[in-house]
Amino acid sequence: MTAEKNDSNAVALQEATRAEVEATTDIRQFVTFIVGDEVFAVDMAPVQEIIRVPEVVKVPLAPRTLDGLANLRGKVLPIISLRRIFGFDERVADDASRAVVIDQGRQPLGFVVDRVVSVVGVDPRHIEGTAAISSTVNTELVSGLLKDVGGYPMIMVLDFGKLIANEFADIAVKAGNHTEIATQAAARPDAQQDKINDELHLVNFEVADQEYAIVIDDVQEIVQVPELIVHVPHSESHVLGVMTLRNRLLPLVSLRRMFGLPTREADENSRIVVVSLGTASVGVVMDSVNEVLRVARTDVDAMPAMLSKEGNLSDISQICRLDSGKRLVSILSVGNMFRHTAIKEALATVDNMADQDAQQGTAVSAKRSDDDRSDDEEQVVVFVLGKEEFGVPIDSVQEIVRVAEAMTRVPKAPPAVEGVINLRGAVLPVMDLRRRLGLEQIARSDRQRIMVFLIDGVRTGFIVDSVVEVLKVHKTTIEPAPHLSGEQSMLLARMANLEKQKRMVQLLDPSYLIEKQELQALAQLAAA
C-alpha cells in the first residue's frame, strides 16, 4: 500500500508540474501604459518598438488625431495622439512621453502615450472578457481586461486593429494597393503642359537690386546656401569656394563679384542657382530668387550691339521687357558665363582638388557627369506652407510670380478663390493653397508667391508662403505617403524622405488641387 501511495503521489506531482508548465507556456506578454488618468495595455505581438516622441512634419487634410509624420530609420512613421482619439485634454509631450509603434503588417503607426509603465507577463487566468463592463463602458476598442496585474486592479486591453480601422480606415488599404496608387500618380502622363513655342521660360533672380534671369533649361536646380563652404586658398575673389552637393564637389562663384558689385554676406533669402553647360556645373550665388516667368518672345530683345562688350561683361545676351516696358530684366547667357574667367577659375579649382584627392588615395570624386540628368532623379520645386516643405514636379509649374498688391474680387466665384489678376493680358484665378489644404490663414507678405499650374486646361494660381528651391531628388528617397484619408492620398500621395538632410518634402500632385465641380466655374472665370 505504501508503494502504491508513493506512486500515486508521484503521478499527482507530475500532473501538477505538467499543469504548471502548461500554464507558464500560456503566459502572454503585454505592454502597459498610461494615457490621461487611465491605464491601458496592448498585446506585445504587434508592438514593433517603443521610442521617444520624435519631431514630426504636419500633414494637411489628415485626421485631427494625427500629430504628423516622423522619420524612423529612413521610413516614414505616422505619429498619432491617443489623447485626441479618446477625447482627453491636450498635453504637450514631455520626457516621460513615448510613442508605441504598432505594426500589423500594413503601415506601422506610432501612438503617443503619456508614460509606458512596464512589460508584464500575464497568466491567462487573469484575463477576462469585456462582458462585465459592457453595460457601463463603451468596449468597442477594448478586447479584454487584465485583473490584478502590475499592481492595478483592472487594466483595459486596447484592440489596436479596431482602433486603426475606426480612426484611420484608409490606412487599412494594403501597402501594395497604396504603392500602386502612388506609382500611377508618379507615372501619369502630363498632357496638360503648355506646348507654345513662342515663350521663354525663365528663372528670375535679384542681385544688388537689379533683376536678372536665366533660361530654365540651363538651370539644374536651386539650393540654399550651405553652412559649410570650403574656401580655397589663393583663388580669385569671385570664387567663394566649393560645397558638397550629393557626394560631388560643386564650385561656387559670386555674381556680385563677377559684376564688380559691392559684396554682401549671404542671408536666408540667398540662393545658389546651379547652372550647367555640357558636363560642367557651377553654383552661382544670388541675393534672392524671385520668380519663374513665362515671357513672350516678342517681349525679348537682343542686347544692343553698341552695349554688348567682349570678355567678362558679355554675359547679358538679351533684355526682357515686362509691365509694358516699365520693368527690364537682363537675361544671362550661360554659354557666355562659362567663358568668364571667374567660372573657369572655379572649375579649375574643383579639378585641382579632385586631382589632389586622387593622388592622396581619398574616395572623394569631383567629376562632373551627366548624373544630374539621370532618369533616377526627379526635379521638384520646393515651397513652404508654415513650417512644412512641399514639392511639385518642375514640369507642372507654368510660372511663379509675385502676389499682386490688389486682386480683383469676383462675385459668386468658388469659395477658395481669392480673386483674379491680370497676367500678361489674361485673367488668372488665384486661390490660397493654405485654405485649400485646411491650414490657418496668414497675412500677406513680400515672400509669398503665386505658383501657376495648368489643370485640365485651366490656368490657375495658388498662393504659397515662399518658394525655397528647385531640387533634384533621387527616386530611391521617394516613397508612398501614409494613406491617411481619401483626399490626402490623391493630392499628397508621395513623400521625399531626405534622411541625411533631416528633411521630409511632401510631394503634391497639382492635378488634384481643384475639385472637378470647381473647374467649370474657374474656366468661366478665366474666360471672362
Image (cartoon, helix red, strand yellow):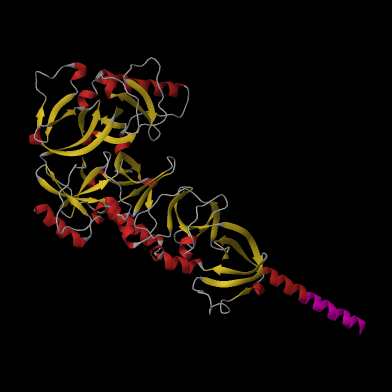
Q: Nearer the viewer, residue 382 or 462?
A: 462
Q: Is any atom of residue 81 visible in this view? A: yes
Residue 6's place in the image compared with 466, above or below, is below
464 inside magenta stretch: no
Q: Nearer the viewer, residue 380 or 168?
A: 168
Residue displayed at 24% across by 42% down: 449
Q: Which residue is most to the top?
A: 234
Residue 216, percent across and down? 22, 36
Residue 368, percent across and down? 33, 30
Which secondary structure is most common in the magenta stretch? helix
Residue 475, percent across and down? 35, 46
Question: Taking 343 as reference, is 308 left or right?
Answer: left
Q: Which residue is most to the right?
A: 2
3 inside magenta stretch: yes
Question: Taking 339 as reference, is 197 left or right?
Answer: left
Question: Taking 301 as reference, is 444 left or right?
Answer: right
Residue 21, percent across and down? 72, 70
Q: Nearer the viewer, residue 198 or 90?
A: 90
Residue 261's place in the image compared with 148, above or below, is above
Q: Nearer the viewer, residue 97 or 460?
A: 97
Region of the chain picked out in magenta, as a range = 1-15
Count the marks: how many?
0
In the picture, which quadrant includes the N terminus? bottom right
Residue 51's place in the image compared with 4, above or below, is above
Q: Is any atom of residue 108 visible in this view? A: no
Figure quadrant of residue 221: top left
